[in-house]
Amino acid sequence: MSHLKEVVARGQPDAGAELVSLEMIEEFSITGTPGQVAERFSHLAQMGVNEFVFGPPFGHNWRETVRDILTHARNLPDEPTTATQ
């Protein structure tokens, strides 16, 4: 991770992108279909997380993406059965 920070700090974000692993993406972001994202949010909320920050990329239209996630979240049971990433 420190090497990644150094590369990006030197103004080489493209070189830094090559250092980002799939595991890092999964650890530091929530990705997937709107249903998968909503399920992950639900699981995190059950763990006590009470605030989420949306950042790009959002898909084709950010409003539509957020609306889709919220629609799926409203349809989830109060107690999620399993966490998905």
Image: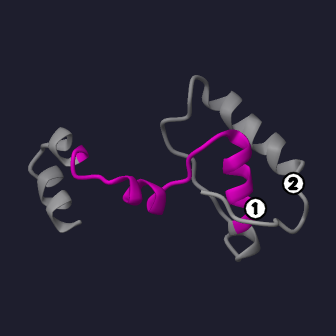
Compared with 38, 13 (above or below) is above
Q: Position of residue 68 (x, y in %)?
A: 75, 35
The segment highlighted magenta reads: 17-43
Q: Nearer the viewer, residue 53 or 80?
A: 80
Q: Residue at x 12, y 53 (%)?
A: 7
Q: Earlier in the sequence, mark 2 or mark 1?
A: 1
> Residue placed farthest to the bottom in the image?
47
Q: Is residue 20 magenta?
A: yes
Q: Which mark is residue 42?
A: 1
Tell me the element at label 2: loop
Q: Nearer the viewer, residue 59 or 21?
A: 21
Q: Which residue in the protein does label 2 denote?
A: 76
Tell me the element at label 1: helix
- Amino acid on which disc 1 is placed: Ser
Q: Could you tell me if the residues under marks 2 and 1 are in contact, i.e. CB atoms within 8 Å? A: yes
Q: Is residue 7 magenta?
A: no
Magenta stretch: dominant SS? helix
Q: Is residue 53 left or right of residue 56?
A: right
Q: Residue at x 70, y 76 (%)?
A: 47
Q: How is the image coloured?
A: one colour
Compared with 17, 41 (above or below) is below
Label 2 neighbour load within 10 Å: few <14, some 14-19, many 20+: some
- Amino acid on which disc 2 is placed: Leu
Q: Is residue 57 left or right of residue 20?
A: right
